[in-house]
């Protein structure tokens, strides 16, 4: 078997795995309730991003997870890649954070970049960006020192990797593009019939890459992340997105 390593951001609280008088195994969070049971294991009640909850023994949990207000640089980078904003404990200004910019399919940029607030216009011009969308905290004189003082911004606030931008290369009006963009992003709120229409449109316009097209138009995943995940070029994704916008029905 191969060895794997991974990171995820979860929610957790101290808990106890107990065996009650009837022999049932349960997870409780109250110490008083745990004392009434015969067998007790210390650990954490864990909630994963998809809502699934489970019990993790204390030793295994402590080896795998760290609080989000005490991250090293490696964990901070992984948080940025997952779309979260990160700041340092010593930054005094309100609202200062670092966020990864992921260009959309029609940006002149072809790689994720991050910009310093004090020089973002010059940096964007140097990299050929049409308009800087990343917002990054003021440069820190002590950025190279120490570990463990990085944390998620605003209790783990996640930045959006996508935002609506008019696509000049798509022969569809600004208003129509806006309707298509937001209708697609609200996929999970559509009726079952509407969802089937949208999925069939992705099959029609994306062909063998329909899953990549579907993920790009219905989630906040950026073009770079989608292309890397599904092993296709940006130009292939751009063509599929253009066909999608051109073929979108007048009304779902």
Image (spheres, helix red, strand yellow):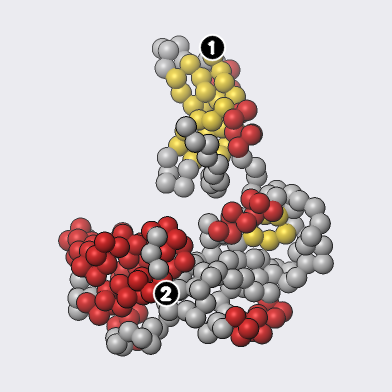
Direction from residue 94 to residue 224 in the image, left or right: left
Number of numbered callouts drawn: 2
- Where in the figure is residue 124, as x and y percent of width and height? 61, 81
User: How would you rate the neighbour count of disc 2 (Cα within 10 Å): few for under 14, some for 14-19, many for 20 or more?
Assistant: many
Q: Secondary structure at mark 1?
A: loop
Asked whether 43 or 112 is in front, the reply is 112
- Where in the figure is residue 97, as x and y percent of width and height? 66, 66
Q: Residue at x 64, y 34 (%)?
A: 62
Q: Which residue is mark 1?
A: 38
Asked whether 220 or 6 is in front, the reply is 6
Q: Are discs 2 and 1 less than 8 Å apart at CB? A: no
Give the CA separation, mark 2 to mark 1: 59 Å
Q: Residue at x 35, y 71 (%)?
A: 236
Q: Residue at x 49, y 81 (%)?
A: 108
Q: Which corner quadrant of the image does residue 180 belong to?
A: bottom left
Q: Which corner quadrant of the image does residue 6 belong to?
A: top right
Q: Earlier in the sequence, mark 2 or mark 1?
A: 1
Is 35 rendered above or below residue 246?
A: above
């Amino acid at each position: 078997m191969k060895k794997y390593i991974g990171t995820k951001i979860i929610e957790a609280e101290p808990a106890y795995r107990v065996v009650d008088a009837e022999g049932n195994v349960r997870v409780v969070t109250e110490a008083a309730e745990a004392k009434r049971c015969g067998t007790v294991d210390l650990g954490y009640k864990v909630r994963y991003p998809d809502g699934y909850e489970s019990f993790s023994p204390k030793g295994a949990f402590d080896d795998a997870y760290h609080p989000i207000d005490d991250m090293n640089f490696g964990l901070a980078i992984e948080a940025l890649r997952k779309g979260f904003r990160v700041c340092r404990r010593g930054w005094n200004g309100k609202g200062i954070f670092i966020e990864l910019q992921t260009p959309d399919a029609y940006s002149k940029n072809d790689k994720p970049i991050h910009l310093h607030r004090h020089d973002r216009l010059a940096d964007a011009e140097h990299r050929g960006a049409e308009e800087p969308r990343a917002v990054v905290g003021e440069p820190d004189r002590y950025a190279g020192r120490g570990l463990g003082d990085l944390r998620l911004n605003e209790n783990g606030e996640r930045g959006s990797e996508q935002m609506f931008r008019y696509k000049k290369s798509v022969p569809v009006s600004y208003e129509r593009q806006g309707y298509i963009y937001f209708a697609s992003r609200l996929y999970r709120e559509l009726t079952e019939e509407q969802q089937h229409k949208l999925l069939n449109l992705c099959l029609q316009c994306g062909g063998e890459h329909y899953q990549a097209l579907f993920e790009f138009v219905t989630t906040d995943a950026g073009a770079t992340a989608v292309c890397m995940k599904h092993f296709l070029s940006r130009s292939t994704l751009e063509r599929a997105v253009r066909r999608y916008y051109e073929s979108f029905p007048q009304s779902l």
